[in-house]
Image (cartoon, helix red, strand yellow):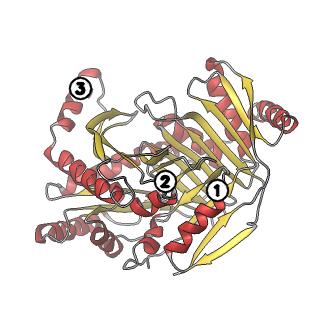
Amino acid sequence: MCYVLYLMSQKKQLHPYSYPISPASLPNWKRLLLHWSKQFPQALFLDSNQYQQDQFARYEVLLGVSSNTESTLHHKYNCNKDLFKALNKLHDSNWLFGHLTYELKDLIEPQLSSHLADALNFPMAHFFEAEIVVQIPKSANELLILATDDETAGRVFQAIALTYMDLAEPIPQQVPIALKARTTKAAYLEKLHALKAHIQRGDIYEVNLCQEFYAEDVSLDPVYTFEELNNIGKAPFSAFYKLQSHYLLCASPERYLQKENSTLRSQPIKGTIKRGKNKQEDNTLQNKLLASKKDKSENVMIVDLVRNDLTRCAKLGSIKVAELFGLYSFNTVHHLISTIVCEMEEGLPFTEAFQASFPMGSMTGAPKVSAMQLIEKHEDRRRGLYSGSVGYIDPNGDFDFNVVIRSLLYNAENQYLSCQVGGAITHYSDPESEYEECLLKAEGVMRALGAI
C-alpha cells in the first residue's frame, strides 16, 4: 500500500505576542477566529468549550492556519517505519496541525487491508506547518498570536478583529438536510448478531460496529454548520478542520492521546446513556449507567487494550489507571471515561506513541487486530477520518489528539456529506439497544442539519 504524507515547510520561528481580552468577550473572539480562519486553504480550529471536567486541556482555543495550497515535501512510503521516522524528522521543532485516518492501521499492522468504498477521499494522513498560531489560554484573559515578528502579529490581530464586519452580514439560510442510512436497520441487526457469534466462539471479546448516514449533492456552509453543531454539543474536543475542499465538523467528547513532557495520557470512552428531562431523571440515568454491567465490561476491556498498547512505548512499571469509570456529563449524553497514564521510555521519538496505540482501542475492539479484520468484513463504508484523529504537535513534541466521532465530514468538490456512528458490541449487547444508541449519538448532527 502506498502512503502520502504532506507537510508544509516554513523555516522562520514563531514568537508569541499577547493581546488582552476579557473572559466575557470569549464567545465573540471564538467566532471571529473561526470565521477568519476559513479564508485559508488549511486551517484547524480546536475548541475546548470551557468544559470543566477536562482538567488536562492546555488551551481554551488553539488555531493553526496555512496559506499554502501545495506541499513542498511530498513523500511516498511503503512501510510504517519510514512514515513515522519522516513525520518525526519533518516536525523539526515546528507547530504541526493535521489528522490521521482510521486506515493508517494498514501501515501499522501489515496483516490488515482496506477495500471498502470511500466518497470523501481525505488523505490517509496530513499535517501542515502553521504560518500563524493563535491561542486563547484556559483563563481566557489574553489572545496570543504566534508569528515571525510583532508587525505580522499586529496585522493578524487587526484582521481578526475586523472580521466582525463579515459577521454583521445575515446568516445564510441553510436548507434542512436529511441523511440517509447506508445500512438498513435489519442489515445492521444481522451484522450485530454475526459479530456476537464471533464473541461467543471466543474469536474476539469486543468490537466497535459503525454505520454511515449520508447525503449527496449537498451545498453546505461548513462554518455556520460547525457553529450549529458546536452550540449543540459544547464538547471538549470540538474541531473545525479545513483541508482545501475537505472539511471536518467535529463535536467530539473524547481524547485519544495527549503527550505532556514525558507523560502520555489516554481517555477512552465506553458507556453511554442519554440525559434526563429533569434533575431527578438525570440522576436516575447516571446511576443506571454506573450500575450497568454491559457498559462497565466494555470500559474494562478497552482500558486493558490501551494499557497493552502503551507497553510498547512506556517506561517499565509506569502504566497506571488514574481513573476507572469516571462519570462525565455532556449536553446530550452521559459517558463513562477512564484515564490511563504512563511515562514514555527515554530516548523514543514522540511518534512512537502514535505507532504504539493507533487506531484507538475505543473505536476498534479486542483483540485489536482480529476486531479490525471483522470491522472490514461487516461494515459497508470506509471509515476514513471518522474514528481517526485530529490535533496538534507543538515545537517541543507535546501533542493532544481527539477521537473523531459525533462529526460531519464533507467533500465540497463532489458535494458528499457523511456522518458515521457506532458502538461497542460485547456478549451483553442487546441488538435493539445498540441500534438506538447509534441514533442517540447521531442526534446532535441531525439537529445541526435541521433534520430534527
Q: What SS does tag 2 mark? A: loop
Is residue 329 left or right of 69 when viewed as pictured? Answer: left
Q: Residue shown at 18%/50% (left/top)?
A: 297
Earlier in the chain: of badge 2 and badge 3, it is 2
Q: Position of residue 70 (x, y in %)?
A: 76, 66
Q: Which amino acid lies under the numbered mark 1 shown in the image of this protein?
A: Ser
- Whole-Å distance between the Cαs marked 2 and 3? 33 Å
Q: List x then y, in percent, for residue 91.
A: 64, 57
- Quadrant in which the C terminus appears: top left
Question: Badge 2 local density, few (<14 within 10 Å), some, or many (20+)?
Answer: some
Of marks 3 and 1, the one in the foreground: 3
Q: Nearer the viewer, residue 130 or 240?
A: 130
Q: Which residue is mark 2?
A: 178
Q: Position of residue 5 (x, y in %)?
A: 62, 69
Residue at the disc numbered 1:
219
Q: Please name the residue shown 65% across and 62% down the image.
A: 90
Q: In the rendering, at what x and y percent does residue 4 appear?
A: 61, 73
Please name the residue shown 33% across and 62% down the image: 364
Kind of residue at badge 3? Asn
In terms of sequence position, does the residue under pointer 2 or pointer 1 come before the other? 2
Q: Secondary structure at mark 3?
A: helix
Mark 3 vs 1, N-terminal side: 1
